[in-house]
Every structure is written in structure tokens, then in C-alpha cells.
């Protein structure tokens, strides 16, 4: 048990989206129904769950990008940055202009982004292309720029949503190494991934989110075992065959 005071606490948080239903109708879709968790200083917290379980919405809540529709969020004044690639990118603007815009959207001032810009460009390996519109970039170049901006924002809390290993093999290795260094240096991290090996390797605790609810939280090995036992059980359950008797 961590004896420190949590940086962020979510208490029975729910978030819904408006969903179109026909020309004039619509309904609420609860992406998060009931999620509770605590994030402590210096820990790496893993988030696991099926596709559509609500993990990405949860990360946006932690980043302050969207607000909860029910429940309570306590943030002790810490800035969390979501490593969401291409956040705010506009294709007709240059890489430089997009880097500045994306940094501002993450929470930096324009002056702060400009002070980090040379390092962002160098890490992304885009020196020759930075003043070209990003519509001319490959997907790998765009991913590298997005990752670099988020990385150099250097927030109190880093939120990583399935972005380790972006770009080509060389950049993949460099970006993963950089994130591991930040984790070793006691940076507070929330990490979403389907890669169980990475989660087991770097996470101190894990929260399992299922159907918009926090199903289990605790020791990494214990939660991962329960989660994978559930996956195995679902895989071994035969599909219900339709009744064809007359």
C-alpha cells in the first residue's frame, strides 16, 4: 500500500456521449459507467481491458480533456499530459506550426513550446522537413512529431495510450527507451496497453476496466492473472448455437 497522498482520485466516475439514433433522435452512450482509482506519486499505473472497455475515455478524463458527467475527480493541482499522437494537428500547417499548436493544447504556453522546439524537432528527426506542411509527411513522420511534442511537454503526469513503438524500428527503440528512462526517474505514468509483457515489466499496479467499470485494481501480477484468466475463459466458452428444431 502506498502511504503517499494520491495525485489524482476518481470516485465512481461516469462519462457519456450523445449518440445519433435516426434523423432527429439520439440517446446517451455511457463510455464510463463507474470507475474509481487512485494515482500515487512516482508510480506507473497500468490500465487493461478489452477494446471498447472505456480506457481511452478514462485517459481523456485523467488529462482533463473531458469532464465527468457523474462522480467526483480530485486533482491536487498536477498537470497530466496525454501522449495522443497528432493532438490538434492541422494538415495544411507546417510541422513547426503544428508542434507549437499541439504543445499549447497539451497545456504549455507558446513561450514554453518555443523554448523546447529545437529538442522536439531533433528528437523527431524532422530537421529537414519541419517547415513543410504536414500533409506532405508520411504517417511515421507525423507520429514521430506527435510523440516528441508530448514527450517534451514534461508534465507532472504522463498518460500513455498505446503509443510506445511509434514510427520505424529505430524510432520505436528510441521512443521506448526514453519512456523507460522517465519511468526509472520516478515520473508518474499511466499506461494503457494490450501488451501484457510491457505492462508486467513497467507497471507497479494495474486497474482492469471492463464495460466502463473498474472491475479490479491492485498488484500487477494479481490483476493481470485475473484479467487473462477472464480472457481465456471467454475464449473457451462455446458460442450459443441457434435452435433449429421445428
Image (cartoon, rainbow, N blue to C red):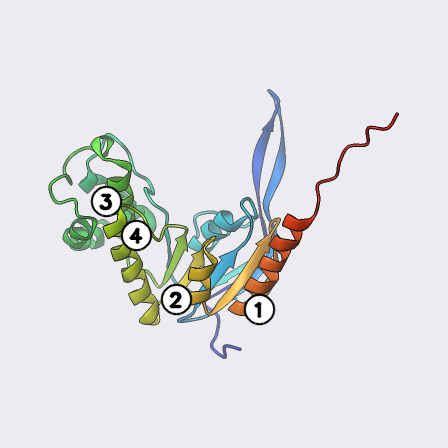
Across and down, in percent, residue 206 comes to 52, 64
Q: Residues within 10 Å of mark 4 (few under 14, many from 20)?
A: many
Q: Quick check: marks 2 and 1 in contact, CB under 8 Å?
A: no
Q: Does dot 1 land on a helix, a strand or a loop?
A: helix
Q: CA distance from mark 4 to mark 3?
A: 9 Å
Q: Residues within 10 Å of mark 1 (few under 14, many from 20)?
A: few
Q: Is residue 16 above or below residue 75?
A: above
Nearer the observer: mark 3 or 1; the answer is 1
Q: CA distance from mark 2 to mark 1?
A: 21 Å
Q: CA distance from mark 2 to mark 4?
A: 15 Å
Tell which circle, 2 or 3, labels the residue nearer the N-terminal end: 3
Q: CA distance from mark 2 to mark 3?
A: 24 Å
**Quadrant of res 222:** bottom right
Q: Quick check: marks 2 and 3 in contact, CB under 8 Å?
A: no
Give the number of marks.
4
Across and down, in percent, residue 72 comes to 57, 58
Left or right, residue 160 beside residue 221: left
- The residue located at (77%, 32%) in the rendering is 242
Q: Does dot 4 land on a helix, a strand or a loop?
A: helix
Q: Residues within 10 Å of mark 3 (few under 14, many from 20)?
A: many
Query: Disc 3 marks which residue?
Result: 99
Q: Which mark is residue 150?
A: 4
- The residue located at (22%, 49%) in the rendering is 110
Tell which circle, 2 or 4, labels the residue nearer the N-terminal end: 4
Across and down, in percent, residue 61 comes to 48, 52
Left or right, residue 105 beside residue 229: left
Q: CA distance from mark 4 to mark 1?
A: 31 Å
- The residue located at (19%, 53%) in the rendering is 123
Query: Disc 2 marks which residue?
Result: 188
Tell which circle, 3 or 1, labels the residue nearer the N-terminal end: 3
Query: Disc 1 marks which residue?
Result: 222
Left or right, residue 186 beside residue 22: left
Amino acid at each position: 500500500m502506498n502511504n503517499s497522498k494520491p495525485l489524482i482520485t476518481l470516485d465512481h466516475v461516469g462519462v457519456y456521449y450523445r449518440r445519433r439514433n435516426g434523423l432527429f433522435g439520439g440517446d446517451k452512450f455511457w463510455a464510463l459507467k463507474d470507475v474509481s482509482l487512485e494515482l500515487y506519486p512516482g508510480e506507473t499505473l497500468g490500465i487493461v481491458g478489452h477494446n471498447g472497455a472505456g480506457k481511452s475515455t478514462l485517459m481523456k478524463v485523467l488529462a482533463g480533456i473531458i469532464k465527468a458527467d457523474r462522480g467526483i475527480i480530485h486533482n491536487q493541482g498536477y498537470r497530466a499530459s496525454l501522449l495522443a499522437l497528432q493532438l490538434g494537428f492541422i494538415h495544411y500547417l507546417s510541422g513547426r506550426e503544428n508542434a507549437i499548436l499541439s504543445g499549447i493544447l497539451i497545456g504549455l504556453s507558446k513561450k514554453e513550446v518555443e523554448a523546447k522546439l529545437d529538442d522536439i524537432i531533433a528528437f523527431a528527426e524532422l530537421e529537414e522537413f519541419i517547415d513543410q506542411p504536414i500533409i506532405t509527411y508520411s504517417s511515421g513522420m507525423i507520429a514521430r512529431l506527435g510523440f516528441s511534442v508530448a514527450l517534451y511537454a514534461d508534465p507532472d503526469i504522463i498518460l500513455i495510450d498505446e503509443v510506445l513503438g511509434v514510427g520505424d524500428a529505430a524510432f520505436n527503440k528510441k521512443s521506448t527507451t526514453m519512456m523507460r528512462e522517465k519511468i526509472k526517474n520516478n515520473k508518474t505514468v499511466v499506461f494503457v496497453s494490450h501488451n501484457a509483457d510491457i505492462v508486467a515489466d513497467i507497471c507497479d499496479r494495474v486497474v482492469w476496466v471492463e464495460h466502463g467499470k473498474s472491475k479490479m485494481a491492485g498488484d500487477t501480477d494479481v490483476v493481470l492473472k485475473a484479467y487473462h484468466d477472464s480472457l481465456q475463459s471467454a475464449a473457451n466458452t462455446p458460442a450459443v448455437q441457434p435452435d433449429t428444431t421445428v
